[in-house]
Image (cartoon, grey):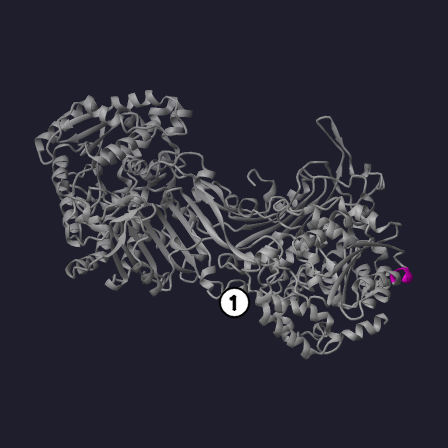
Amino acid sequence: MDARSFAVSYSSPYSPSSAFRNGHHHPLVVNVSSLSNCKILSRHLTQICPSLEVVRMQDVATKHNAVDKESPVENLKDGLFSATSSHERSDGLCFDYRKDESTVSITVVGASGDLAKKKIFPALFALFYEDCLPKHFTVYGYARSKMTNAELRNMVSKTLTCRIDKRENCSEKMEQFLNRCFYHSGQYDSLDNFMELDTKIKEHEAGRISNRLFYLSIPPNIFIDAVRCASLSASSTNGWTRVIVEKPFGRDSESSAALTRGLKKYLNEDQIFRIDHYLGKELVENLSVLRFSNLVFEPLWSRQYIRNVQLIFSEDFGTEGRGGYFDNYGIIRDIMQNHLLQILALFAMETPVSCDAEDIRNEKVKVLRSMRPLQLENLVVGQYKSHTKGGITYPGYTDDMTVPKDSLTPTFAAAALFIDNARWDGVPFLMKAGKALHTRRAEIRVQFRHVPGNLYNRNIGTDLDQATNELVIKIQPDEAIYLKINNKVPGLGMRLDRSTLNLHYAARYSKEIPDAYERLLLDAIDGERRLFIRSDELDAAWALFTPLLKELEEKKIIPEYYPYGSRGPVGAHYLAARYNVRWGDLGLEQ
Amino acid sequence: MAIRNLSPCSSSGTINLSPSVPHYGTPFSTKSVNFSSRDNSCRWVSHILSEFRSRKLIQLKSSNGHPLNAVSFKDDLPGSPIAKEHTMPQVEGSLPIAESVREQPTLSITIVGASGDLAKKKIFPALFALFYEDCLPENFTVFGYARTEMTDEQLRNMISETLTCRIDKRENCDEKMKEFLKRCFYQSGQYNSEEDFSELNRKLKEKEAGRLPNRLFYLSIPPNIFVDVVRCASLKASSKVGWTRVIVEKPFGRDSDSSRELTRCLKQYLHEDQIFRIDHYLGKELVENLSVLRFSNLVFEPLWSRNFIRNVQLIFSEDFGTEGRGGYFDSYGIIRDIMQNHLLQILALFAMETPVSLDAEDIRNEKVKVLRSMRPLQLEDVIVGQYKGHNKGAKSYPSYTDDPSVAKDSLTPTFAAAALFVNNARWDGVPFLMKAGKALHTKRGEIRVQFRHVPGNLYKTNFGTDLDKATNELVIRVQPDEALFLKINNKVPGLGMRLDRSDLNLLYKARYPREIPDAYERLLLDAIEGERRLFIRSDELDAAWALFTPLLKDLEQRKIAPELYPYGSRGPVGAHYLAAKYNVRWGDLSAEDS
């Protein structure tokens, strides 16, 4: 079956992909995906959650992809059946695929890479450990290096850990997991090698419905090759085939469009899962919950009350000898155009019709398309230089062996963005991202306007803007949400200060928060696309940044230098000042 | 116009220029403004600028003694027996500084009923705390007045037992205590004897030593002798040149008529602006903070109306009964003792429109408007209860009527819950539920604001059938363990999408290490400074009684039997049915009760 027929098989009237293309959904699919939380199922929650809905959803996740094999009527029947029999689910397993019939094969392409070792395998193990993977699953490592299964397992085992909060059976579970891991070596552009992989996979599938997930953890220049080979030689014939793609998704509008075109030659839109791991962060997920499930926030969510929004990302280390990839992209492409812009879109979107992936992504695209084109003067770029502190010398960016000495690549950028729609007109959205700064953090700060006709003005001093409310969502580290309020300092007298109403995750929730990759892998397995980036979203994101990036490069704008470990170039303050904003993360009281 | 004063001591921080000030000429008022805005605080001054201390204090006093915030009353009762506040200090205030220096003011605080419980437990300790914090003027004396024969020494002995220093700073505690006690004196006398008060006056004068005298009387005595004492004090012991103020403790009558009678009698001898009706709940830190929260934060005011608030709950509970001292309580009951004053005051503060300024009169005007907008209370919107004996473990707790000081057949409610409504544009249809009781399972005072559910909630399926259970709630815990928290729906971290209610919270203990001063300290200081914001004006009191009197009469005439509830329980279940009637669920008795 070649790529074409593969795509065609998906366009049966009941398949989700056709629903997607026609712009409407099969009603059952909509229902189900809006409840989409397979994850609710994780063991200790089974009793609490409405398992009925969950099970229906599960079924659809399966059906989704198994459509071409089964008649829709059967699917429906099956859905009803499992819905009614949901009480029998006493095993506490996360997945209730028709038990012995379907299987998931997860192939990590680029298995010997860093991301695979540090994130993907550990995330898969964590899912397994939490019983969130289907009963039948196998994990394949695919890379060019020659390796035996044992060697792969050895390599993988070094990075696996059990959750701190429940360590029982850890080594036992690890062994079980490793037993399901296999390795296949091959070239990324060899149809034959992928054919061999296919044979191996088939062997383990043992005739069950086969669902296949490919995780492309490889450099972008070989994306298309790998996708071509996987799709032509190793895609599932009776289940689904999905491909998770990691950034970079191109380096500008054209290259991104070319990449998408290339992918679409072999894959359908709904088979492409562009991962942005920031969207899998707990507090980014919580953003919508906070906003849409609480009465107290939504009324404030507009230009009427919000003065500015700040999206801040900082790392406290530089490229550390691995600047090769980075130098070609720079901080704007690496962090802003994807992670921060995605958060911005999620933050600023209108209320979606439902929590369905397409509804949410539709709203996000609308935000991106309403954005005012970015101007060079609304951008500050910086690059870190070496710095000596207490006997230790920290290297400058261009000291990195893998970086050209005359590189102008920004390692820091701050930008002011605007959304020209009714809700956000005039509200500056400030982004800031940098490497080698004084701290490691990611946060969203919402600064509210000052109180009109404030009775307590005299207690606040001359700058009313210093006494405004601020909502801070700390994404990492130390997840927390806090709202800064003006409060009377207890005691005689009337002195006001800013205190926080806060929710510190570590204090409130004893459970360890899962890594973003766990959530995203599980979503991909479930076919939940909410947290993945659709092609048109990506287009819109590039359309916003491409002209600016081109201009930066053509004009050879020299970045403002800042010392390694500092708070970044002062230019960022002037940019903020221009829009009457004060960075919330660099104030006295944070 | 109000001048905000950043003083840590000046509890008000506000020097009022009431709207009628222009009558007295602008130059004079601007001068006063300058004074008061400069003389930041007694403590600051004493610690940082000690050399200027006396001078600054004088400025403070002169502007305080100055009846700027009283002028609006001048027209009310011209030529009343002691209208001293209006004459001398006014001249004083408008005089140049040098003039005031010559006439150093002095403050005499007389506690009438000095041997009583309140005096021992609250008033003297509060005065000492103020002294300890350098919040009292340089020249002050404290007089105890009661019928008991006692020497100064004996009084000091008695007082010293209840004085404590703040936990967070104990330096010089003994020394300070000694200094304070040296300024305490005792005068025994009858409460209705003008001669005895003359004698007091003589002693006061002696201590005042010719300085400008300001006198504060604290009436810590039963209500039946209020008027006698006020008469004697006013005729014989009031200040001739400085101000004379009288702090009155509840009860302020037991219904509209008796309250009005009391006010009428007080007004025979005192001006409105000399009467400081204390409601110590208004001095609580978090009640004070209520207005700050609302008016100095952008995020709350937009939500402060029927559009977003589903109901408001005002809850007061004590975990003990009358414990052998039910004599006074039995003739008043919980409605008069807690609801009609403390809870209703908080309600008014909560529900009022934005005042023109933080000026006492502006705030009290708004509060009166709320009270007057209230729908008359109906009997069917009230539940009354009375605690009965209860055995728990080996211990048996007495019932209310077991109290020897209570009539065996007493129907006096020790518990009450009521649904009130404010019929104005902001609050129409929003139930304000009050609940107050003795001998309950816990001791607490709190305000709970329950918000409406999210219209068209995207996460409906995550909530189960009762959307009202997943609403936001703002809780202001007045006591104990002062705290603010906002309950929000949050995603439980982890894979999946499970929501729970978490708190955005501010625990005072964790945020503010300093000990929170007792309400009495704040109120005494306010009275000394002439800040009336937290005291109850006569028309407020009238309106409060007008709301409750018909109901109280109804209850008594019909001899409504209270629902009995066991000592130490959560109160009568009737309260739940009352709440249910208005589609409310008590926030303090739910499963997740914090």
Does B511 sit above or below residue B211? below
Residue B478 horizontal side relative to residue A277, left or right = left
Q: Residue at x 30, y 40 (%)?
A: B531
Magenta-highlighted residues: A190-194
Residue A36 horizontal side relative to residue B314, left or right = right
Q: Quadrant of the C terminus of chain A?
A: top right
Location of residue A15 in the rendering, given as x and y in whole percent from the top left corner: 72, 74
Q: Quadrant of the N terminus of chain A?
A: bottom right
Q: Please state which of residues B104 and A363 is positioned toward the viewer in this rendering.
A: A363
Count the numbered circles shown: 1
Q: Amino acid at mark 1?
A: Gly
Residue matched to label 1: B456
Residue A128 horizontal side relative to residue B118, left or right = right
Quadrant hosting residue A254: bottom right
Location of residue B454 in the rendering, given as x and y in whole percent from the top left corner: 49, 63
Location of residue A197 in the rendering, given as x and y in whole percent from the top left corner: 85, 60
Neighbour tally class for label 1: few under 14, some 14-19, many 20 plus, Cα within 10 Å: few
Residue A464 horizontal side relative to residue A442, left or right = left
